[in-house]
Image (cartoon, rainbow, N blue to C red):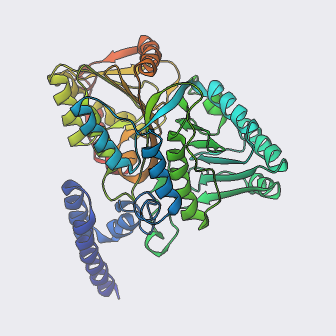
Amino acid sequence: MFFSFILFMHTVGALTSVRAILETRTSQGAIAWAVSLNAFPYLAVPTYWVLGQSRFDNYDVLRHRQFIAENEIAQELVKQVVDDGLLSQPTASRDIQRARLLQSLAKQPFTNFNDAELLIDGEATFDAILEGIASAEDYILVQFYIWRDDELGQRIKDALLSKAAEGVRVYALYDALGSLDLTTEYLEELKRGGVDIRGFSTTKGVGNRFRVNFRNHRKIVLVDGRVAYVGGSNIGVEYLGQHPVLTPWRDTHVAVRGPVVLGVQISFMEDWQWVAETTPELNWSFEKAPTGDMAALCLPTGPADDLETASLFFLDAINAAEERLWIVSPYFVPDEQLMSALQLAALRGVDVRVLIPENPDHQLVYLSSFSYLEEAEKSGVKLFRYLPGFLHQKVMLIDDRASAIGTCNFDNRSMRLNFEITMIIIDEAFASEVEAMLEQDFAVSRRVVASEYTDRHWWFRFKVRAARLMAPIQ
Protein backbone atom coordinates (compact mmCIF):
# COMPACT_ATOMS: atom_id res chain seq x y z
CA MET A 1 0.00 0.00 0.00
CA PHE A 2 2.87 2.36 0.79
CA PHE A 3 4.50 1.91 -2.62
CA SER A 4 1.11 2.11 -4.32
CA PHE A 5 0.50 5.46 -2.61
CA ILE A 6 3.91 6.77 -3.71
CA LEU A 7 3.26 5.64 -7.30
CA PHE A 8 -0.18 7.19 -7.26
CA MET A 9 1.04 10.57 -5.96
CA HIS A 10 3.89 10.77 -8.46
CA THR A 11 1.50 9.89 -11.27
CA VAL A 12 -0.91 12.61 -10.16
CA GLY A 13 2.01 15.00 -9.79
CA ALA A 14 3.23 14.27 -13.32
CA LEU A 15 -0.24 14.72 -14.82
CA THR A 16 -0.80 17.92 -12.86
CA SER A 17 2.56 19.25 -14.04
CA VAL A 18 1.35 18.86 -17.62
CA ARG A 19 -1.63 21.04 -16.80
CA ALA A 20 0.61 23.55 -15.02
CA ILE A 21 2.89 23.82 -18.07
CA LEU A 22 -0.10 24.31 -20.36
CA GLU A 23 -1.95 26.86 -18.22
CA THR A 24 0.53 28.80 -16.06
CA ARG A 25 0.84 32.32 -17.46
CA THR A 26 4.57 32.83 -16.88
CA SER A 27 7.43 30.56 -17.90
CA GLN A 28 9.07 30.96 -14.48
CA GLY A 29 5.88 29.83 -12.78
CA ALA A 30 5.46 26.89 -15.15
CA ILE A 31 9.02 25.70 -14.46
CA ALA A 32 8.61 26.09 -10.69
CA TRP A 33 5.36 24.14 -10.64
CA ALA A 34 6.63 21.41 -12.99
CA VAL A 35 9.71 20.76 -10.85
CA SER A 36 7.88 20.82 -7.52
CA LEU A 37 4.93 18.71 -8.72
CA ASN A 38 7.25 15.96 -9.88
CA ALA A 39 9.80 16.17 -7.06
CA PHE A 40 7.45 16.74 -4.09
CA PRO A 41 3.95 15.76 -5.26
CA TYR A 42 2.69 15.05 -1.71
CA LEU A 43 2.83 18.75 -0.86
CA ALA A 44 2.84 20.36 -4.31
CA VAL A 45 -0.31 18.72 -5.73
CA PRO A 46 -2.76 20.04 -3.09
CA THR A 47 -0.93 23.37 -3.06
CA TYR A 48 -1.29 23.71 -6.82
CA TRP A 49 -5.01 23.02 -6.80
CA VAL A 50 -5.51 25.61 -4.06
CA LEU A 51 -3.00 28.33 -5.03
CA GLY A 52 -1.44 27.53 -8.37
CA GLN A 53 -4.09 28.40 -10.92
CA SER A 54 -4.49 31.90 -12.35
CA ARG A 55 -7.51 31.37 -14.60
CA PHE A 56 -11.01 31.84 -13.18
CA ASP A 57 -13.48 29.56 -14.97
CA ASN A 58 -17.19 29.89 -15.77
CA TYR A 59 -17.32 33.66 -15.17
CA ASP A 60 -18.73 35.41 -18.22
CA VAL A 61 -17.28 38.85 -18.85
CA LEU A 62 -20.50 40.50 -19.91
CA ARG A 63 -18.71 43.38 -21.60
CA HIS A 64 -17.35 40.89 -24.12
CA ARG A 65 -19.42 37.74 -24.25
CA GLN A 66 -22.97 38.77 -23.44
CA PHE A 67 -23.40 42.38 -22.50
CA ILE A 68 -22.03 43.94 -25.68
CA ALA A 69 -22.65 41.10 -28.12
CA GLU A 70 -26.18 40.06 -27.18
CA ASN A 71 -27.73 42.47 -24.71
CA GLU A 72 -30.08 45.01 -26.31
CA ILE A 73 -29.48 47.50 -23.49
CA ALA A 74 -25.75 47.42 -24.17
CA GLN A 75 -26.31 47.99 -27.86
CA GLU A 76 -28.41 51.04 -27.02
CA LEU A 77 -25.66 52.31 -24.71
CA VAL A 78 -23.10 52.12 -27.48
CA LYS A 79 -25.49 53.94 -29.81
CA GLN A 80 -26.07 56.69 -27.23
CA VAL A 81 -22.34 57.18 -26.77
CA VAL A 82 -21.94 57.91 -30.48
CA ASP A 83 -25.18 59.77 -31.18
CA ASP A 84 -25.01 62.02 -28.11
CA GLY A 85 -21.38 62.95 -28.64
CA LEU A 86 -20.33 61.44 -25.31
CA LEU A 87 -17.36 59.56 -26.74
CA SER A 88 -14.09 61.28 -25.88
CA GLN A 89 -12.25 62.41 -29.01
CA PRO A 90 -8.58 63.14 -28.27
CA THR A 91 -6.78 65.31 -30.82
CA ALA A 92 -3.21 64.02 -30.87
CA SER A 93 -2.63 60.86 -32.90
CA ARG A 94 -0.72 59.28 -30.02
CA ASP A 95 -3.62 60.02 -27.66
CA ILE A 96 -6.03 58.40 -30.12
CA GLN A 97 -3.92 55.23 -30.20
CA ARG A 98 -3.70 55.12 -26.41
CA ALA A 99 -7.43 55.72 -26.02
CA ARG A 100 -8.16 52.88 -28.43
CA LEU A 101 -5.85 50.60 -26.48
CA LEU A 102 -7.48 51.38 -23.14
CA GLN A 103 -10.96 51.03 -24.61
CA SER A 104 -9.97 47.63 -26.00
CA LEU A 105 -8.74 46.53 -22.57
CA ALA A 106 -11.80 47.86 -20.73
CA LYS A 107 -14.29 46.86 -23.45
CA GLN A 108 -15.91 50.18 -22.62
CA PRO A 109 -15.60 53.62 -24.24
CA PHE A 110 -13.93 56.73 -22.92
CA THR A 111 -16.69 59.27 -22.32
CA ASN A 112 -16.83 63.05 -21.88
CA PHE A 113 -19.03 65.14 -19.58
CA ASN A 114 -17.86 63.42 -16.38
CA ASP A 115 -16.93 64.90 -13.02
CA ALA A 116 -14.62 63.42 -10.38
CA GLU A 117 -14.17 64.39 -6.74
CA LEU A 118 -11.18 63.32 -4.65
CA LEU A 119 -12.13 61.78 -1.31
CA ILE A 120 -9.06 61.79 0.91
CA ASP A 121 -9.05 59.31 3.81
CA GLY A 122 -11.89 57.45 5.46
CA GLU A 123 -13.94 60.21 7.08
CA ALA A 124 -14.37 62.13 3.82
CA THR A 125 -15.00 58.90 1.90
CA PHE A 126 -17.72 57.48 4.10
CA ASP A 127 -19.34 60.85 4.76
CA ALA A 128 -19.76 61.15 0.98
CA ILE A 129 -20.91 57.54 0.62
CA LEU A 130 -23.50 57.87 3.38
CA GLU A 131 -24.73 61.12 1.85
CA GLY A 132 -25.02 59.38 -1.51
CA ILE A 133 -26.94 56.47 0.04
CA ALA A 134 -29.31 58.92 1.74
CA SER A 135 -30.06 60.55 -1.64
CA ALA A 136 -31.05 57.27 -3.35
CA GLU A 137 -34.51 57.16 -4.91
CA ASP A 138 -34.50 53.89 -6.90
CA TYR A 139 -31.59 51.57 -6.08
CA ILE A 140 -28.22 51.26 -4.38
CA LEU A 141 -25.39 48.92 -5.39
CA VAL A 142 -22.78 48.15 -2.70
CA GLN A 143 -19.67 46.00 -3.01
CA PHE A 144 -16.69 45.67 -0.66
CA TYR A 145 -13.82 43.24 -0.24
CA ILE A 146 -13.78 43.64 3.56
CA TRP A 147 -17.09 44.28 5.30
CA ARG A 148 -16.92 44.29 9.09
CA ASP A 149 -19.58 44.21 11.79
CA ASP A 150 -18.10 47.14 13.71
CA GLU A 151 -19.01 50.78 14.30
CA LEU A 152 -18.66 51.72 10.63
CA GLY A 153 -20.38 48.51 9.54
CA GLN A 154 -23.32 49.38 11.79
CA ARG A 155 -23.57 52.86 10.24
CA ILE A 156 -23.62 51.38 6.74
CA LYS A 157 -26.15 48.75 7.76
CA ASP A 158 -28.49 51.31 9.34
CA ALA A 159 -28.26 53.54 6.26
CA LEU A 160 -29.08 50.67 3.90
CA LEU A 161 -31.95 49.42 6.06
CA SER A 162 -33.39 52.92 6.22
CA LYS A 163 -33.44 53.25 2.43
CA ALA A 164 -34.79 49.71 1.98
CA ALA A 165 -37.66 50.62 4.33
CA GLU A 166 -38.45 53.53 1.98
CA GLY A 167 -38.75 51.12 -0.94
CA VAL A 168 -35.30 51.68 -2.44
CA ARG A 169 -33.83 48.47 -3.85
CA VAL A 170 -30.46 47.53 -2.32
CA TYR A 171 -28.11 44.96 -3.86
CA ALA A 172 -24.94 44.23 -1.89
CA LEU A 173 -21.88 42.02 -2.38
CA TYR A 174 -18.99 41.13 -0.09
CA ASP A 175 -16.03 38.87 -0.73
CA ALA A 176 -16.61 35.60 1.10
CA LEU A 177 -12.95 35.28 2.15
CA GLY A 178 -12.15 38.95 2.70
CA SER A 179 -15.24 39.29 4.93
CA LEU A 180 -14.88 35.90 6.61
CA ASP A 181 -15.63 37.27 10.08
CA LEU A 182 -18.86 39.01 9.05
CA THR A 183 -21.47 37.71 11.50
CA THR A 184 -24.57 35.76 10.56
CA GLU A 185 -26.67 38.05 12.74
CA TYR A 186 -25.49 41.09 10.77
CA LEU A 187 -26.31 39.48 7.43
CA GLU A 188 -29.70 38.21 8.57
CA GLU A 189 -30.70 41.65 9.85
CA LEU A 190 -29.93 43.15 6.45
CA LYS A 191 -31.84 40.41 4.64
CA ARG A 192 -34.88 40.74 6.92
CA GLY A 193 -34.85 44.46 6.24
CA GLY A 194 -35.08 43.95 2.48
CA VAL A 195 -31.41 44.21 1.51
CA ASP A 196 -30.35 41.57 -1.01
CA ILE A 197 -26.82 40.86 0.25
CA ARG A 198 -24.68 37.98 -1.00
CA GLY A 199 -21.14 36.68 -0.68
CA PHE A 200 -18.92 36.48 -3.74
CA SER A 201 -17.38 33.02 -3.47
CA THR A 202 -14.55 32.21 -5.87
CA THR A 203 -15.04 28.48 -5.19
CA LYS A 204 -18.44 28.47 -6.89
CA GLY A 205 -18.65 26.03 -9.81
CA VAL A 206 -17.04 22.65 -10.38
CA GLY A 207 -13.89 24.07 -11.97
CA ASN A 208 -13.30 26.51 -9.10
CA ARG A 209 -14.03 24.28 -6.12
CA PHE A 210 -10.51 24.34 -4.67
CA ARG A 211 -9.46 27.76 -5.95
CA VAL A 212 -9.32 29.81 -2.77
CA ASN A 213 -6.49 32.01 -4.02
CA PHE A 214 -8.80 34.34 -5.97
CA ARG A 215 -10.39 37.40 -4.38
CA ASN A 216 -12.97 39.99 -5.38
CA HIS A 217 -11.11 43.11 -4.26
CA ARG A 218 -13.50 45.71 -5.70
CA LYS A 219 -14.99 48.50 -3.57
CA ILE A 220 -18.04 50.12 -5.15
CA VAL A 221 -21.05 52.11 -4.01
CA LEU A 222 -23.38 53.25 -6.80
CA VAL A 223 -26.63 55.20 -6.49
CA ASP A 224 -29.41 55.32 -9.11
CA GLY A 225 -26.94 55.11 -12.01
CA ARG A 226 -25.94 58.73 -11.26
CA VAL A 227 -22.96 58.62 -8.89
CA ALA A 228 -20.36 55.97 -8.07
CA TYR A 229 -17.74 55.79 -5.33
CA VAL A 230 -14.61 53.73 -6.06
CA GLY A 231 -11.27 53.46 -4.26
CA GLY A 232 -9.20 51.78 -1.58
CA SER A 233 -11.38 51.96 1.53
CA ASN A 234 -13.28 48.98 2.90
CA ILE A 235 -15.97 48.89 5.57
CA GLY A 236 -14.02 48.78 8.82
CA VAL A 237 -13.11 51.26 11.56
CA GLU A 238 -9.42 50.97 10.66
CA TYR A 239 -10.23 52.99 7.55
CA LEU A 240 -11.44 55.75 9.86
CA GLY A 241 -8.10 55.77 11.67
CA GLN A 242 -9.06 53.42 14.51
CA HIS A 243 -6.58 50.60 13.91
CA PRO A 244 -4.78 49.73 17.18
CA VAL A 245 -1.33 49.96 15.53
CA LEU A 246 -1.55 51.25 11.94
CA THR A 247 -2.98 54.68 12.64
CA PRO A 248 -3.55 57.04 10.92
CA TRP A 249 -4.78 55.08 7.90
CA ARG A 250 -4.06 56.83 4.60
CA ASP A 251 -6.45 56.04 1.74
CA THR A 252 -8.05 57.62 -1.32
CA HIS A 253 -11.44 57.20 -2.96
CA VAL A 254 -13.04 59.03 -5.88
CA ALA A 255 -16.67 59.97 -6.51
CA VAL A 256 -17.57 60.06 -10.20
CA ARG A 257 -20.65 61.43 -11.96
CA GLY A 258 -21.55 61.29 -15.62
CA PRO A 259 -21.63 58.56 -18.28
CA VAL A 260 -18.64 56.72 -16.78
CA VAL A 261 -20.88 55.69 -13.86
CA LEU A 262 -22.55 53.15 -16.14
CA GLY A 263 -19.15 51.51 -16.68
CA VAL A 264 -18.94 50.95 -12.93
CA GLN A 265 -22.48 49.60 -13.01
CA ILE A 266 -21.52 47.07 -15.69
CA SER A 267 -18.65 45.86 -13.48
CA PHE A 268 -21.00 45.37 -10.53
CA MET A 269 -23.54 43.56 -12.71
CA GLU A 270 -20.93 41.08 -13.92
CA ASP A 271 -20.20 40.13 -10.32
CA TRP A 272 -23.86 40.12 -9.35
CA GLN A 273 -24.79 37.78 -12.19
CA TRP A 274 -21.99 35.40 -11.17
CA VAL A 275 -23.37 35.24 -7.63
CA ALA A 276 -27.15 35.63 -8.03
CA GLU A 277 -27.69 34.54 -11.65
CA THR A 278 -30.24 37.33 -12.01
CA THR A 279 -30.24 40.75 -13.74
CA PRO A 280 -32.04 43.49 -11.80
CA GLU A 281 -33.61 46.32 -13.79
CA LEU A 282 -31.34 49.33 -13.47
CA ASN A 283 -31.03 52.80 -14.97
CA TRP A 284 -28.98 52.51 -18.19
CA SER A 285 -29.51 56.02 -19.57
CA PHE A 286 -26.49 58.29 -19.90
CA GLU A 287 -26.57 61.44 -17.80
CA LYS A 288 -24.01 64.20 -18.14
CA ALA A 289 -22.44 65.35 -14.90
CA PRO A 290 -24.00 68.57 -13.56
CA THR A 291 -20.53 70.15 -13.68
CA GLY A 292 -17.27 69.10 -15.30
CA ASP A 293 -16.24 67.85 -18.69
CA MET A 294 -13.66 65.21 -17.84
CA ALA A 295 -12.80 62.29 -20.08
CA ALA A 296 -13.04 59.12 -18.01
CA LEU A 297 -12.96 55.35 -18.40
CA CYS A 298 -13.87 52.54 -16.01
CA LEU A 299 -11.40 49.63 -16.19
CA PRO A 300 -12.57 46.43 -14.46
CA THR A 301 -9.89 43.74 -14.43
CA GLY A 302 -9.69 40.19 -13.17
CA PRO A 303 -8.64 36.56 -13.64
CA ALA A 304 -11.61 35.88 -15.95
CA ASP A 305 -10.37 38.36 -18.57
CA ASP A 306 -9.08 36.95 -21.85
CA LEU A 307 -5.87 38.96 -21.42
CA GLU A 308 -3.85 40.04 -18.38
CA THR A 309 -5.72 43.31 -18.46
CA ALA A 310 -4.28 44.92 -15.34
CA SER A 311 -0.67 44.17 -16.30
CA LEU A 312 -1.22 45.53 -19.80
CA PHE A 313 -2.77 48.71 -18.42
CA PHE A 314 0.15 49.39 -16.07
CA LEU A 315 2.68 48.64 -18.79
CA ASP A 316 0.96 51.07 -21.14
CA ALA A 317 0.75 53.76 -18.47
CA ILE A 318 4.45 53.43 -17.69
CA ASN A 319 5.38 53.54 -21.36
CA ALA A 320 3.10 56.55 -21.93
CA ALA A 321 4.74 58.72 -19.28
CA GLU A 322 6.89 61.50 -20.72
CA GLU A 323 7.70 63.70 -17.73
CA ARG A 324 6.27 62.18 -14.55
CA LEU A 325 5.07 58.84 -13.24
CA TRP A 326 4.07 58.68 -9.58
CA ILE A 327 2.80 55.36 -8.25
CA VAL A 328 1.34 54.86 -4.77
CA SER A 329 0.62 51.34 -3.56
CA PRO A 330 0.74 49.55 -0.20
CA TYR A 331 1.93 46.38 -1.94
CA PHE A 332 4.80 46.93 -4.37
CA VAL A 333 5.88 43.54 -5.74
CA PRO A 334 6.19 44.05 -9.52
CA ASP A 335 7.16 41.24 -11.86
CA GLU A 336 10.16 41.51 -14.18
CA GLN A 337 8.30 43.14 -17.07
CA LEU A 338 6.82 45.90 -14.91
CA MET A 339 10.12 46.56 -13.13
CA SER A 340 11.91 46.76 -16.47
CA ALA A 341 9.31 49.21 -17.75
CA LEU A 342 9.84 51.41 -14.68
CA GLN A 343 13.60 51.33 -15.22
CA LEU A 344 13.24 52.27 -18.89
CA ALA A 345 10.95 55.18 -17.99
CA ALA A 346 13.47 56.50 -15.49
CA LEU A 347 16.35 56.07 -17.95
CA ARG A 348 14.56 58.16 -20.55
CA GLY A 349 14.24 61.00 -18.05
CA VAL A 350 10.79 60.45 -16.53
CA ASP A 351 10.41 61.39 -12.85
CA VAL A 352 9.52 57.92 -11.58
CA ARG A 353 8.50 57.80 -7.92
CA VAL A 354 7.03 54.90 -6.01
CA LEU A 355 5.47 55.50 -2.59
CA ILE A 356 5.02 52.52 -0.27
CA PRO A 357 4.39 52.17 3.49
CA GLU A 358 7.05 52.38 6.17
CA ASN A 359 4.76 50.46 8.52
CA PRO A 360 3.57 47.24 6.85
CA ASP A 361 0.49 45.14 7.41
CA HIS A 362 1.92 42.23 5.39
CA GLN A 363 5.40 41.02 6.30
CA LEU A 364 6.13 39.10 3.09
CA VAL A 365 5.27 42.13 0.95
CA TYR A 366 7.36 44.38 3.20
CA LEU A 367 10.39 42.11 2.87
CA SER A 368 9.90 41.70 -0.89
CA SER A 369 10.05 45.46 -1.42
CA PHE A 370 13.70 45.56 -0.31
CA SER A 371 14.68 43.30 -3.20
CA TYR A 372 13.87 46.06 -5.73
CA LEU A 373 16.07 48.75 -4.19
CA GLU A 374 19.24 47.96 -6.14
CA GLU A 375 17.41 47.73 -9.48
CA ALA A 376 15.56 50.95 -8.77
CA GLU A 377 18.55 52.98 -7.68
CA LYS A 378 20.72 51.95 -10.63
CA SER A 379 18.15 53.21 -13.14
CA GLY A 380 16.91 56.30 -11.28
CA VAL A 381 13.59 54.95 -10.01
CA LYS A 382 13.01 56.68 -6.65
CA LEU A 383 11.34 54.75 -3.84
CA PHE A 384 9.83 56.48 -0.80
CA ARG A 385 8.34 55.15 2.39
CA TYR A 386 5.32 56.89 3.91
CA LEU A 387 6.02 57.45 7.61
CA PRO A 388 2.73 58.12 9.47
CA GLY A 389 0.47 55.15 10.16
CA PHE A 390 -0.31 52.94 7.18
CA LEU A 391 -0.51 53.81 3.48
CA HIS A 392 -3.28 51.90 1.69
CA GLN A 393 -4.23 54.09 -1.31
CA LYS A 394 -3.87 52.91 -4.92
CA VAL A 395 -3.15 55.98 -7.03
CA MET A 396 -1.15 56.71 -10.18
CA LEU A 397 -0.36 60.08 -11.77
CA ILE A 398 0.97 60.24 -15.33
CA ASP A 399 2.42 63.57 -16.51
CA ASP A 400 0.02 66.49 -15.92
CA ARG A 401 -3.15 64.99 -17.42
CA ALA A 402 -3.88 61.40 -16.46
CA SER A 403 -4.84 59.94 -13.09
CA ALA A 404 -5.81 56.42 -12.05
CA ILE A 405 -7.55 55.70 -8.74
CA GLY A 406 -9.05 52.40 -7.71
CA THR A 407 -8.45 49.11 -5.97
CA CYS A 408 -5.51 47.67 -7.94
CA ASN A 409 -2.18 47.19 -6.15
CA PHE A 410 1.21 46.93 -7.84
CA ASP A 411 1.63 43.21 -7.23
CA ASN A 412 0.93 39.84 -8.80
CA ARG A 413 -2.26 39.31 -6.82
CA SER A 414 -3.91 42.43 -8.22
CA MET A 415 -2.49 41.85 -11.69
CA ARG A 416 -3.57 38.23 -12.04
CA LEU A 417 -5.62 36.87 -9.13
CA ASN A 418 -7.99 39.60 -7.93
CA PHE A 419 -11.06 41.17 -9.45
CA GLU A 420 -10.20 44.89 -9.40
CA ILE A 421 -11.57 48.19 -10.69
CA THR A 422 -9.72 51.36 -11.68
CA MET A 423 -11.07 54.77 -12.66
CA ILE A 424 -8.93 56.47 -15.35
CA ILE A 425 -9.49 60.22 -15.54
CA ILE A 426 -7.97 62.48 -18.20
CA ASP A 427 -8.19 66.07 -16.98
CA GLU A 428 -5.49 68.61 -16.13
CA ALA A 429 -7.37 70.26 -13.29
CA PHE A 430 -8.12 66.93 -11.61
CA ALA A 431 -4.51 65.81 -12.15
CA SER A 432 -3.40 68.99 -10.37
CA GLU A 433 -5.55 68.02 -7.38
CA VAL A 434 -4.00 64.55 -7.34
CA GLU A 435 -0.53 66.10 -7.60
CA ALA A 436 -1.19 68.39 -4.63
CA MET A 437 -2.48 65.43 -2.59
CA LEU A 438 0.56 63.30 -3.38
CA GLU A 439 2.97 66.17 -2.73
CA GLN A 440 1.64 66.24 0.83
CA ASP A 441 2.20 62.49 1.09
CA PHE A 442 5.78 62.76 -0.19
CA ALA A 443 6.40 65.57 2.31
CA VAL A 444 5.89 63.11 5.19
CA SER A 445 7.85 60.31 3.54
CA ARG A 446 11.52 59.40 3.35
CA ARG A 447 13.64 58.40 0.39
CA VAL A 448 14.76 54.76 0.47
CA VAL A 449 18.29 53.85 -0.68
CA ALA A 450 19.77 50.55 -1.83
CA SER A 451 22.14 50.33 1.15
CA GLU A 452 19.14 49.58 3.35
CA TYR A 453 19.24 46.19 1.67
CA THR A 454 22.84 45.67 0.59
CA ASP A 455 24.38 46.61 3.97
CA ARG A 456 22.13 44.37 6.02
CA HIS A 457 23.07 40.98 7.46
CA TRP A 458 23.07 38.05 5.02
CA TRP A 459 20.18 36.46 6.92
CA PHE A 460 17.98 39.52 6.28
CA ARG A 461 18.94 39.52 2.60
CA PHE A 462 18.11 35.82 2.40
CA LYS A 463 14.67 36.44 3.90
CA VAL A 464 14.12 39.25 1.40
CA ARG A 465 14.96 37.04 -1.57
CA ALA A 466 12.86 34.18 -0.18
CA ALA A 467 9.93 36.56 0.26
CA ARG A 468 10.26 37.70 -3.34
CA LEU A 469 10.02 34.09 -4.48
CA MET A 470 6.60 34.00 -2.86
CA ALA A 471 5.44 36.98 -4.94
CA PRO A 472 3.07 34.93 -7.16
CA ILE A 473 0.78 34.17 -4.20
CA GLN A 474 1.23 37.33 -2.12
Place of residue 449 in the rendered image (x, y in percent of width and height, measured from the top left)? 26, 19
Q: Quadrant of the N terminus?
A: bottom left
Q: Is residue 403 visible?
A: yes
- The image position of residue 76, as x and y in percent, is 50, 55
Q: Is residue 251 visible?
A: no
Point 55% across, 35% down: residue: 288
Going 57% across and 35% down the picture, which residue do you hit? Answer: 233
Of residue 29 and residue 200, the one placed in the foreground of this image is 200
Q: Is residue 166 left or right of residue 303?
A: right
Q: Residue at x 40, y 36 (%)?
A: 331
Q: Indicate left or right for 353 with 126 as reference.
A: left
The image quadrant that residue 237 belongs to is top right
On screen, 460 above or below 21? Answer: above
Task: Judge left or right: residue 255 versus residue 411.
Answer: right
Pick the residue in front: 299 or 82: 82
Against 186, residue 411 (above or below) is above
Residue 462, image x and y in percent?
26, 38
